[in-house]
Amino acid sequence: MTKKKLAEEIIERLKKEYPDAGCTLDYDDAWKLLVSVRLAAQCTDARVNVVVEDLYAKYPDVDALAGAEAEEIEKIIRPCGLGKSKARDISACMKILKEQYGGNVPDDFDALLKLPGVGRKSANLIMGDVFGKPAIVTDTHCIRLVNRMGLVDGIKDPKKVEMALWKIIPPKEGSDFCHRLVYHGRDVCTARTKPYCGQCCLADICAKNGIEKGV
């Protein structure tokens, strides 16, 4: 089976397994997703969702957050870790949105990459979830699972994984596929315990499972 055919089969099976999978960060505006995805670095989405409630209660819009001192932001977001650098990036990012984009988040990938604290993973998440454009989010779940499944061969660098997946994942499927990998990686193909291969909808086509069985 070619990698492209394998990808198509995996996509269809994960659709059936996780039909309603979506972004696990809570947001109701593009700028809030921008903030949350920065806070999510080395922090769980669940904790971010709790912390931002206090942040948005005090700073309810881009203008308010752009006017906040980084030190004040840091006091609120400290439970997410890396408070100083995250607060600095969020403050600078909101100022740019206010001054250059009228308080809106740009829908251009390269423009997003120029924002403080925004890398390819974050930019892809926003392009896919906010703007409905083709996107592949290579977070830790994605990188781990596509290597285990055999969609990529021992590639750990996020950008290289992304580029490899663009070749085999249909553009319209990329964003939802990556969200489903997060669910699957948390529930079944886990990192901190042995994967629950006996419960996996992909067990018969997974490269790692085949190797362990001596296939």
Image (spheres, helix red, strand yellow):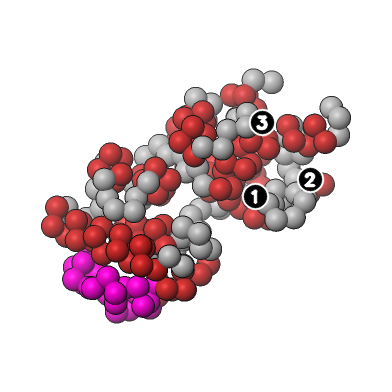
**Amino acid at circle 3:** Gly
- 116 sits left or right of 2 in the view: left
Contact? badges 1 and 2 (CB < 8 Å): no
The residue under the point 51% across, 28% down is 164
Secondary-structure class at tag 3:
loop
State which tag comes first along the sequence, 2 or 3. Answer: 3
State which tag comes first along the sequence, 1 or 2. Answer: 1
**Amino acid at circle 1:** His
**Quadrant the N terminus occupies:** top right
Q: Which mark is residue 150?
A: 3
Residue 107: x and y, percent? 27, 44
Residue 99: x and y, percent? 13, 57
Secondary-structure class at tag 2:
helix
**Amino acid at circle 2:** Cys
Contact? badges 2 and 3 (CB < 8 Å): no
State which tag comes first along the sequence, 1 or 3. Answer: 3
Residue 173: x and y, percent? 50, 37
The residue under the point 64% across, 50% down is 185
Q: Write down the quadrant of residue 72 in the picture.
A: bottom left
